[in-house]
Image (spheres, rainbow, N blue to C red):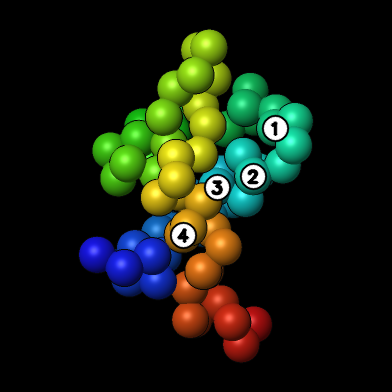
């Protein structure tokens, strides 16, 4: 599945979590546990030192974004 196809399947909370984790020093404590689990299941996040972090696939999805978001 292409990054833009994956992006189209994400809800608002999942997008917010991915964008938050893209920051240099993300505050993962504000993320919903359910959202983190969903993103782990999609291989967009992984756990490093007990904290969620973007995978290479997750970074591609954030960078490519969703075509539905490009016009907003």
Position of the C terminus, as image quadrant, is bottom right
- Residue 39, horizontal then vertical, whole percent: 38, 41
Q: Are marks 3 and 2 in contact (CB under 8 Å)?
A: yes
Left or right of 8 on screen, residue 63:
right
| First in sequence: mark 4 vs mark 2 | 2
Distance between the Cα atoms at labels 1 and 3?
10 Å
Cβ–Cβ under 8 Å for marks 1 and 2 = yes
Q: Residue at x 40, y 50 (%)?
A: 57
Marks 3 and 4 close (CB-CB < 8 Å)? yes
Vertical arrangement, residue 27 with respect to residue 43, above or below: above
Measure the alpha-carbon separation of dots 3 and 4: 9 Å
**Looking at the image, which residue sits at the far left?**
1
**First reached walking from the N terminus: tag 1 or tag 3:** 3
In percent of the image, x 48 and y 58: which residue is there? 60
Q: Which residue is mark 1?
A: 26
Q: Secondary structure at mark 4?
A: helix
Secondary structure state at the residue bearing disc 2: helix
**Within 10 Å of the Cα at label 1, are there few (<14), some (14-19), or many (20+) other Cα atoms?**
some
Q: Residue under circle 3? A: 18
The residue positioned 50% from the left and 12% from the top of the image is: 50
The Cα–Cα distance between marks 1 and 4, rounded to whole angstroms, is: 17 Å
Q: Which circle, 3 or 2, is nearer the viewer?
A: 2
Residue 25 appears in the picture as rendered: yes
Secondary structure beneath disc 3?
helix
Tell me the residue at 41%/29% (across/down): 46
Question: For this rendering, which residue is in front, 67 or 34?
Answer: 67
- Report the residue marked by disc 4: 61
Pinpoint residue 5: horizontal percent, then vertical percent. 33, 71
- Where does label 2 land, which residue? 22
């Amino acid at each position: 599945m292409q990054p833009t196809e994956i992006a189209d399947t994400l809800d608002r909370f999942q997008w917010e979590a991915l964008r938050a984790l893209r920051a240099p020093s993300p505050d993962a404590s504000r993320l919903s546990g359910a959202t983190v689990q969903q993103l782990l299941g999609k291989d967009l996040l992984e756990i490093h030192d007990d904290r969620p972090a973007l995978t290479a696939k997750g970074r591609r999805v954030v960078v490519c974004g969703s075509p539905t978001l490009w016009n907003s």
